Amino acid sequence: MDKEAKLKEKKKIIIEALKRCLERSVYSNITVQEVADEAGFSKGGLLHYFQSKEDMYMELIRDVFEEIHEDHARVLNGNLDAREQAGISALYGVEKFFLDKRTTKIFLNLMLYAFEDENIMNKMKEFFHKHLEFYTTMIDRSHAENPQRRKTDIDPVVAARIAQIVMIGAGMFESVDQTNIDQYNLTRYVLSLIKG
């Protein structure tokens, strides 16, 4: 294994340890030492790979959001019509944000941290913008395949933002106050927004 691959592997171990810590606690209570212990590193060893707590969180953001963006890219690049893409996208969103409590906890922690750190906030904004672009692209494709639209239809960017809010918001609320919302109905609603 070359030096670059080893570096990536060590960083991945640390980021996975940080994720486990975030499942148990709030970002502000998690120390570099706690993450190091969870990863099986000394504090100095961890700081060899990440110079600060912020650097570690920036890598976490890249890791989590890169996975989401890659999944979205696969949906858009598939040989599916707009309705099929919208369906897969809605199901993916329900799975990632509504059913996966781990993702929701990490996401909430990143949002809280963003209000304290401008660099984290900028990365979060970048994610939201790309996520919004993805939904807007899905809606635009659906409109292109179904041009018999009414003049009163919601603007694609507004519909995309509503879908984004419903998906991410539902996951956050359900992780705090579970109401056993039928995921099928949630998926149908998001799908109706994406399909336009």
Image (cartoon, rainbow, N blue to C red):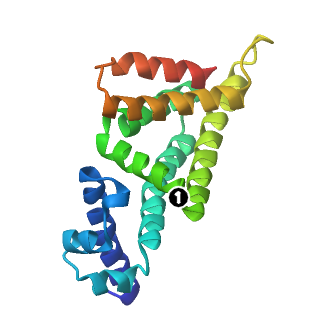
Residue at the image point whose x is 56% and y is 45% from the top: 77
Q: Position of residue 103 (x, y in %)?
A: 36, 46
Identify the residue at image location x=32%, y=73%: 32
Q: Position of residue 134 (x, y in %)?
A: 61, 41
> Can you tell which quarter of the image residue 192 is in?
top right
Left or right: where 108 falls relative to 147 = left
Image quadrant of residue 121?
A: bottom right
Q: Quadrant of the C terminus?
A: top right
Along the horizontal axis of the image, is 8 left or right of 45?
right
Residue 163 percent across, percent down from the top left = 56, 28
Quadrant assignment, res 17? bottom left
Q: Residue at x 42, y 45 (%)?
A: 108
Give the residue displayed 40% in from the left and 15% down from the top.
185
**Above or below, 102 relative to 27:** above
Q: Is residue 143 above or below residue 54?
A: above
Left/right of residue 155 with respect to residue 9 in the rendered view: right
Q: Which residue reaches farthest right? A: 151
Q: Amino acid at mark 1?
A: Glu
Crowdedness near tag 1: few (<14), some (14–19) or many (≥20) residues, C-alpha within 10 Å: few
Residue 39 position, x and y percent, is 22, 71
Q: Which residue is mark 1?
A: 116
Of residues 12 and 53, the one nearer the viewer is 53
For residue 95, side relative to residue 35 (left or right): right
What secondary structure is found at the residue carrying circle 1? loop
Q: Nearer the viewer, residue 1 or 158?
A: 158
**Quarter occupied by the N terminus:** bottom left
